[in-house]
Amino acid sequence: MSSTTSRRARRWALRAATVALGLLTTVAALLGAWLLYAALRLDSTEKLTRQQAAPAGGRWLQAGDTQVHVVDSGPAGAPPLLLVHGTGAWAGTWASNIAALQSAGFRVVAMDLPPFGFSVMLANRDYSRRAQAQRILAVAAQLGPDPVTLLAHSFGGGPAAEAAMLEPSRFAHLVLVDAAIALGPEQAPPCEPPHGAANLLAWRGLRTLLVAGVATEPAFSTHWLEQFVARKEVVTVQRTAIYQKPFAVQGFSEGLGDWAWQFATGCEQPASTRPASFRQLQLPVSLVWGDLDTITPLAQAQQLKALLPRAQLVMLQGVGHIPQIEDVAGFNAAAVRVLRQPPAAGNTERGTR
Protein backbone atom coordinates (compact mmCIF):
# COMPACT_ATOMS: atom_id res chain seq x y z
CA MET A 1 0.00 0.00 0.00
CA SER A 2 1.40 3.44 -0.94
CA SER A 3 1.96 6.11 1.69
CA THR A 4 -0.79 8.24 0.10
CA THR A 5 -3.33 5.42 0.32
CA SER A 6 -2.28 4.69 3.87
CA ARG A 7 -2.78 8.34 4.89
CA ARG A 8 -6.24 8.36 3.28
CA ALA A 9 -7.21 5.18 5.13
CA ARG A 10 -6.07 6.69 8.44
CA ARG A 11 -8.04 9.90 7.75
CA TRP A 12 -11.20 7.92 6.95
CA ALA A 13 -10.72 5.78 10.04
CA LEU A 14 -10.28 8.92 12.16
CA ARG A 15 -13.39 10.49 10.66
CA ALA A 16 -15.42 7.32 11.26
CA ALA A 17 -14.20 7.13 14.85
CA THR A 18 -15.06 10.81 15.37
CA VAL A 19 -18.58 10.31 13.99
CA ALA A 20 -19.10 7.18 16.11
CA LEU A 21 -17.86 8.98 19.21
CA GLY A 22 -20.16 11.90 18.46
CA LEU A 23 -23.15 9.58 18.07
CA LEU A 24 -22.35 7.76 21.30
CA THR A 25 -21.95 11.08 23.12
CA THR A 26 -25.30 12.28 21.75
CA VAL A 27 -27.05 9.06 22.74
CA ALA A 28 -25.50 9.19 26.21
CA ALA A 29 -26.55 12.82 26.61
CA LEU A 30 -30.11 12.08 25.49
CA LEU A 31 -30.34 9.07 27.81
CA GLY A 32 -28.96 11.09 30.69
CA ALA A 33 -31.44 13.89 30.03
CA TRP A 34 -34.30 11.41 29.87
CA LEU A 35 -33.29 9.77 33.14
CA LEU A 36 -32.99 13.20 34.75
CA TYR A 37 -36.48 14.03 33.52
CA ALA A 38 -37.75 10.71 34.93
CA ALA A 39 -36.18 11.49 38.32
CA LEU A 40 -37.78 14.93 38.38
CA ARG A 41 -41.14 13.48 37.40
CA LEU A 42 -40.96 10.94 40.21
CA ASP A 43 -40.36 13.72 42.72
CA SER A 44 -43.30 15.73 41.43
CA THR A 45 -45.92 13.04 40.79
CA GLU A 46 -45.41 9.99 43.03
CA LYS A 47 -46.20 11.88 46.23
CA LEU A 48 -49.43 10.42 47.64
CA THR A 49 -49.86 7.62 50.13
CA ARG A 50 -51.93 4.68 48.99
CA GLN A 51 -54.80 5.82 51.18
CA GLN A 52 -54.67 9.31 49.67
CA ALA A 53 -54.46 8.12 46.07
CA ALA A 54 -56.98 5.27 46.17
CA PRO A 55 -60.55 5.98 45.09
CA ALA A 56 -63.31 5.98 47.68
CA GLY A 57 -64.84 2.63 48.52
CA GLY A 58 -61.71 0.49 48.67
CA ARG A 59 -60.22 -1.13 51.74
CA TRP A 60 -57.08 -3.04 52.69
CA LEU A 61 -56.91 -6.64 53.87
CA GLN A 62 -53.90 -8.15 55.59
CA ALA A 63 -52.55 -10.83 53.26
CA GLY A 64 -49.50 -12.37 54.90
CA ASP A 65 -46.55 -10.12 54.12
CA THR A 66 -48.53 -7.12 52.84
CA GLN A 67 -51.84 -5.29 52.84
CA VAL A 68 -53.89 -5.88 49.71
CA HIS A 69 -56.26 -3.25 48.38
CA VAL A 70 -59.69 -4.59 47.43
CA VAL A 71 -62.90 -3.12 46.08
CA ASP A 72 -65.87 -5.03 47.52
CA SER A 73 -69.08 -4.61 45.54
CA GLY A 74 -71.44 -6.77 47.62
CA PRO A 75 -74.14 -7.85 48.39
CA ALA A 76 -72.46 -9.39 51.41
CA GLY A 77 -74.63 -12.52 51.52
CA ALA A 78 -74.05 -13.56 47.89
CA PRO A 79 -71.44 -16.16 46.84
CA PRO A 80 -68.03 -14.45 46.53
CA LEU A 81 -66.40 -13.84 43.15
CA LEU A 82 -62.76 -12.72 43.40
CA LEU A 83 -61.31 -10.83 40.42
CA VAL A 84 -57.55 -10.81 39.76
CA HIS A 85 -56.23 -8.35 37.17
CA GLY A 86 -53.40 -8.53 34.65
CA THR A 87 -50.16 -6.59 34.14
CA GLY A 88 -50.50 -2.84 34.54
CA ALA A 89 -54.08 -3.10 35.77
CA TRP A 90 -55.78 -2.88 39.17
CA ALA A 91 -59.20 -3.38 40.72
CA GLY A 92 -60.60 -0.25 39.08
CA THR A 93 -59.94 -1.49 35.56
CA TRP A 94 -62.91 -3.91 36.01
CA ALA A 95 -65.25 -0.91 36.28
CA SER A 96 -67.21 -1.79 33.12
CA ASN A 97 -67.75 -5.40 34.21
CA ILE A 98 -68.60 -5.46 37.91
CA ALA A 99 -72.30 -4.64 37.64
CA ALA A 100 -72.85 -7.41 35.07
CA LEU A 101 -70.96 -9.92 37.20
CA GLN A 102 -73.08 -8.96 40.19
CA SER A 103 -76.17 -9.65 38.09
CA ALA A 104 -75.06 -13.28 37.90
CA GLY A 105 -75.72 -13.47 41.63
CA PHE A 106 -72.26 -12.79 43.06
CA ARG A 107 -70.63 -10.57 45.61
CA VAL A 108 -67.82 -9.19 43.43
CA VAL A 109 -64.47 -8.44 45.09
CA ALA A 110 -61.63 -7.07 42.93
CA MET A 111 -58.11 -7.16 44.40
CA ASP A 112 -54.83 -5.45 43.53
CA LEU A 113 -51.91 -7.86 43.26
CA PRO A 114 -48.80 -5.98 44.41
CA PRO A 115 -46.96 -4.03 43.09
CA PHE A 116 -49.95 -2.93 41.01
CA GLY A 117 -52.78 -0.71 42.12
CA PHE A 118 -52.88 0.42 45.72
CA SER A 119 -51.63 -2.63 47.61
CA VAL A 120 -48.68 -1.97 49.91
CA MET A 121 -45.25 -2.39 48.33
CA LEU A 122 -43.42 -5.44 49.62
CA ALA A 123 -40.47 -5.03 51.97
CA ASN A 124 -39.20 -8.49 50.97
CA ARG A 125 -39.72 -7.78 47.22
CA ASP A 126 -41.09 -11.30 46.74
CA TYR A 127 -43.34 -11.18 43.69
CA SER A 128 -42.97 -14.85 42.84
CA ARG A 129 -46.03 -16.70 41.58
CA ARG A 130 -46.26 -18.82 44.69
CA ALA A 131 -46.06 -15.75 46.95
CA GLN A 132 -48.78 -14.04 44.92
CA ALA A 133 -50.89 -17.21 45.17
CA GLN A 134 -50.58 -17.08 48.95
CA ARG A 135 -51.87 -13.50 48.90
CA ILE A 136 -54.86 -14.57 46.79
CA LEU A 137 -55.56 -17.35 49.28
CA ALA A 138 -55.32 -14.93 52.20
CA VAL A 139 -57.86 -12.60 50.60
CA ALA A 140 -60.17 -15.47 49.66
CA ALA A 141 -60.11 -16.75 53.25
CA GLN A 142 -61.49 -13.39 54.44
CA LEU A 143 -64.51 -13.47 52.13
CA GLY A 144 -66.42 -15.96 54.25
CA PRO A 145 -66.70 -19.72 54.69
CA ASP A 146 -68.12 -20.49 51.23
CA PRO A 147 -65.84 -21.54 48.36
CA VAL A 148 -64.81 -18.60 46.19
CA THR A 149 -65.19 -18.33 42.43
CA LEU A 150 -61.87 -17.04 41.10
CA LEU A 151 -61.72 -15.10 37.83
CA ALA A 152 -58.25 -14.02 36.72
CA HIS A 153 -56.91 -12.23 33.67
CA SER A 154 -53.51 -12.35 31.94
CA PHE A 155 -50.60 -12.16 34.42
CA GLY A 156 -53.09 -12.77 37.25
CA GLY A 157 -53.95 -16.17 35.77
CA GLY A 158 -50.68 -17.77 36.86
CA PRO A 159 -50.99 -16.91 40.58
CA ALA A 160 -54.71 -17.75 40.45
CA ALA A 161 -54.04 -21.22 39.02
CA GLU A 162 -51.27 -21.69 41.58
CA ALA A 163 -53.66 -20.76 44.41
CA ALA A 164 -56.23 -23.25 43.10
CA MET A 165 -53.58 -25.97 43.07
CA LEU A 166 -52.37 -25.13 46.58
CA GLU A 167 -55.87 -25.16 48.13
CA PRO A 168 -58.48 -26.42 45.67
CA SER A 169 -61.13 -26.72 48.39
CA ARG A 170 -61.03 -22.94 48.83
CA PHE A 171 -62.47 -22.42 45.34
CA ALA A 172 -65.71 -23.32 43.60
CA HIS A 173 -64.71 -22.46 40.02
CA LEU A 174 -61.57 -21.15 38.30
CA VAL A 175 -62.13 -18.85 35.31
CA LEU A 176 -59.00 -17.95 33.32
CA VAL A 177 -59.29 -15.02 30.89
CA ASP A 178 -56.47 -14.84 28.32
CA ALA A 179 -54.25 -16.14 31.10
CA ALA A 180 -50.45 -15.92 31.04
CA ILE A 181 -49.68 -19.37 32.44
CA ALA A 182 -46.23 -19.92 30.85
CA LEU A 183 -46.85 -23.64 30.67
CA GLY A 184 -43.58 -25.57 30.52
CA PRO A 185 -42.59 -28.97 29.14
CA GLU A 186 -43.40 -32.24 30.89
CA GLN A 187 -39.88 -32.37 32.29
CA ALA A 188 -38.68 -28.86 33.07
CA PRO A 189 -34.97 -28.31 32.38
CA PRO A 190 -32.77 -26.81 35.10
CA CYS A 191 -33.47 -23.11 35.46
CA GLU A 192 -30.58 -20.68 35.13
CA PRO A 193 -31.01 -16.96 35.78
CA PRO A 194 -29.78 -14.64 33.02
CA HIS A 195 -26.34 -13.09 33.15
CA GLY A 196 -24.48 -10.30 31.40
CA ALA A 197 -26.22 -7.08 30.42
CA ALA A 198 -29.37 -7.97 32.37
CA ASN A 199 -27.38 -7.64 35.57
CA LEU A 200 -27.14 -3.89 35.00
CA LEU A 201 -30.74 -3.68 36.13
CA ALA A 202 -29.77 -5.17 39.47
CA TRP A 203 -29.12 -1.55 40.46
CA ARG A 204 -32.48 -0.57 41.91
CA GLY A 205 -32.03 3.13 41.28
CA LEU A 206 -31.36 2.62 37.56
CA ARG A 207 -34.29 0.30 36.96
CA THR A 208 -36.61 2.62 38.89
CA LEU A 209 -35.66 5.50 36.59
CA LEU A 210 -36.07 3.32 33.50
CA VAL A 211 -39.55 2.27 34.64
CA ALA A 212 -40.43 5.89 35.41
CA GLY A 213 -39.18 7.02 32.02
CA VAL A 214 -40.94 4.33 30.02
CA ALA A 215 -43.58 2.23 31.81
CA THR A 216 -45.15 4.81 34.12
CA GLU A 217 -44.52 7.84 31.93
CA PRO A 218 -48.11 9.07 31.27
CA ALA A 219 -47.28 10.16 27.73
CA PHE A 220 -46.69 6.51 26.79
CA SER A 221 -49.72 4.97 28.53
CA THR A 222 -51.99 4.99 25.49
CA HIS A 223 -49.27 3.41 23.35
CA TRP A 224 -48.61 0.59 25.83
CA LEU A 225 -52.30 -0.18 26.32
CA GLU A 226 -52.85 -0.32 22.56
CA GLN A 227 -50.22 -3.07 22.28
CA PHE A 228 -52.49 -5.43 24.23
CA VAL A 229 -55.74 -4.95 22.33
CA ALA A 230 -56.97 -5.72 18.84
CA ARG A 231 -59.57 -2.93 18.94
CA LYS A 232 -57.41 0.17 19.31
CA GLU A 233 -60.42 2.47 19.44
CA VAL A 234 -61.30 1.29 22.95
CA VAL A 235 -58.16 2.94 24.34
CA THR A 236 -59.84 6.27 25.06
CA VAL A 237 -58.55 9.07 27.24
CA GLN A 238 -61.03 8.04 29.92
CA ARG A 239 -60.00 4.38 29.82
CA THR A 240 -56.30 5.23 29.92
CA ALA A 241 -56.88 7.51 32.92
CA ILE A 242 -58.19 4.54 34.91
CA TYR A 243 -54.96 2.62 34.30
CA GLN A 244 -52.88 5.70 35.22
CA LYS A 245 -54.55 6.36 38.58
CA PRO A 246 -51.97 4.43 40.71
CA PHE A 247 -49.12 6.43 39.13
CA ALA A 248 -49.51 9.00 41.92
CA VAL A 249 -48.62 6.51 44.68
CA GLN A 250 -45.33 6.95 46.52
CA GLY A 251 -42.77 4.41 45.33
CA PHE A 252 -44.99 3.02 42.58
CA SER A 253 -42.27 2.98 39.89
CA GLU A 254 -39.78 1.52 42.34
CA GLY A 255 -42.13 -1.36 43.20
CA LEU A 256 -42.88 -1.96 39.54
CA GLY A 257 -39.16 -2.10 38.85
CA ASP A 258 -38.67 -4.67 41.62
CA TRP A 259 -41.45 -6.80 40.15
CA ALA A 260 -40.07 -6.52 36.60
CA TRP A 261 -36.57 -7.44 37.80
CA GLN A 262 -37.78 -10.57 39.59
CA PHE A 263 -40.03 -11.47 36.64
CA ALA A 264 -37.14 -11.16 34.18
CA THR A 265 -34.42 -12.83 36.24
CA GLY A 266 -36.27 -15.20 38.57
CA CYS A 267 -35.78 -18.93 38.40
CA GLU A 268 -39.13 -20.11 39.75
CA GLN A 269 -40.79 -23.32 38.53
CA PRO A 270 -44.16 -23.36 40.32
CA ALA A 271 -46.76 -26.12 40.05
CA SER A 272 -48.93 -24.04 37.71
CA THR A 273 -46.28 -24.21 34.96
CA ARG A 274 -46.38 -28.03 34.89
CA PRO A 275 -48.82 -29.87 32.62
CA ALA A 276 -49.22 -32.67 35.19
CA SER A 277 -50.56 -30.19 37.76
CA PHE A 278 -53.40 -29.19 35.44
CA ARG A 279 -54.26 -32.81 34.70
CA GLN A 280 -54.60 -33.41 38.43
CA LEU A 281 -56.70 -30.30 39.13
CA GLN A 282 -60.04 -31.43 40.54
CA LEU A 283 -61.90 -28.15 40.11
CA PRO A 284 -64.32 -26.71 37.53
CA VAL A 285 -62.26 -24.64 35.09
CA SER A 286 -63.45 -22.26 32.37
CA LEU A 287 -61.26 -20.62 29.74
CA VAL A 288 -62.38 -17.32 28.17
CA TRP A 289 -60.18 -16.13 25.32
CA GLY A 290 -60.02 -13.44 22.66
CA ASP A 291 -59.49 -15.06 19.26
CA LEU A 292 -57.15 -12.23 18.15
CA ASP A 293 -54.93 -12.33 21.25
CA THR A 294 -51.26 -11.97 20.28
CA ILE A 295 -49.93 -11.77 23.85
CA THR A 296 -51.24 -15.16 25.01
CA PRO A 297 -52.46 -16.62 21.71
CA LEU A 298 -55.48 -18.89 21.42
CA ALA A 299 -53.15 -21.87 20.99
CA GLN A 300 -52.27 -21.52 24.67
CA ALA A 301 -55.94 -21.82 25.62
CA GLN A 302 -56.24 -24.91 23.44
CA GLN A 303 -53.19 -26.41 25.13
CA LEU A 304 -54.81 -25.89 28.53
CA LYS A 305 -58.08 -27.33 27.21
CA ALA A 306 -56.25 -30.48 26.17
CA LEU A 307 -54.97 -30.85 29.73
CA LEU A 308 -58.42 -30.08 31.19
CA PRO A 309 -60.85 -32.16 29.12
CA ARG A 310 -63.87 -31.13 31.19
CA ALA A 311 -63.09 -27.43 31.02
CA GLN A 312 -65.21 -25.17 28.84
CA LEU A 313 -63.45 -22.94 26.33
CA VAL A 314 -65.31 -19.81 25.27
CA MET A 315 -63.81 -17.88 22.36
CA LEU A 316 -64.65 -14.21 21.99
CA GLN A 317 -64.63 -13.06 18.39
CA GLY A 318 -62.74 -10.02 17.15
CA VAL A 319 -60.96 -9.13 20.38
CA GLY A 320 -57.40 -9.41 21.63
CA HIS A 321 -55.77 -9.79 25.03
CA ILE A 322 -58.13 -7.61 27.12
CA PRO A 323 -61.65 -8.66 26.07
CA GLN A 324 -63.25 -7.06 29.13
CA ILE A 325 -62.51 -3.59 27.71
CA GLU A 326 -62.46 -4.41 23.98
CA ASP A 327 -66.00 -5.78 23.85
CA VAL A 328 -67.60 -4.94 27.18
CA ALA A 329 -71.06 -6.26 26.33
CA GLY A 330 -69.74 -9.43 24.68
CA PHE A 331 -67.36 -10.21 27.53
CA ASN A 332 -69.94 -9.51 30.22
CA ALA A 333 -72.51 -11.75 28.55
CA ALA A 334 -69.99 -14.59 28.13
CA ALA A 335 -68.72 -14.23 31.70
CA VAL A 336 -72.24 -14.33 33.12
CA ARG A 337 -73.03 -17.50 31.14
CA VAL A 338 -69.83 -19.15 32.34
CA LEU A 339 -70.41 -18.16 35.95
CA ARG A 340 -73.99 -19.38 35.95
CA GLN A 341 -73.13 -22.67 34.25
CA PRO A 342 -69.71 -23.89 35.38
CA PRO A 343 -68.41 -27.13 33.88
CA ALA A 344 -68.11 -30.38 35.80
CA ALA A 345 -65.26 -30.75 38.26
CA GLY A 346 -62.37 -33.16 37.79
CA ASN A 347 -60.47 -34.53 34.83
CA THR A 348 -60.95 -38.25 35.22
CA GLU A 349 -63.31 -38.61 32.27
CA ARG A 350 -62.03 -37.97 28.80
CA GLY A 351 -63.98 -36.03 26.25
CA THR A 352 -64.99 -32.43 25.80
CA ARG A 353 -67.68 -30.20 27.10
Image: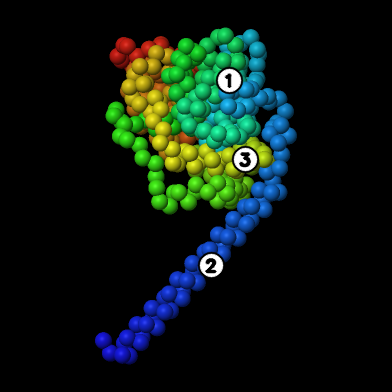
The CA span between labels 2 and 3 is: 30 Å
Q: Residue at x 31, y 11 (%)?
A: 349
Image quadrant containing the N terminus: bottom left
Nearer the observer, 340 or 182: 182
Q: Name the residue that disc number 3 marks.
A: 252
Residue 210 vs 190, above or below: the answer is below
Circle 2 crowding by C-alpha within 10 Å: few under 14, some 14–19, many from 20: few
Q: Name the residue that disc number 1 marks.
A: 139
Residue 89 visible? The answer is: no
- Image spot of residue 217 (x, y percent): 61, 48
- Image spot of residue 174 (x, y percent): 47, 19
- Image spot of residue 259 (x, y percent): 52, 38
Which SS class for mark 2?
helix
Q: Is residue 3 left or right of residue 117?
A: left
- Circles 2 and 3 in contact, beta carbons < 8 Å: no
Query: Residue 226's mark?
Result: none
Q: Amino acid at mark 2?
A: Thr
Query: Residue 26's mark?
Result: 2
Specify the quadrant of the image occupied by residue 7: bottom left
Specify the quadrant of the image occupied by residue 106: top right
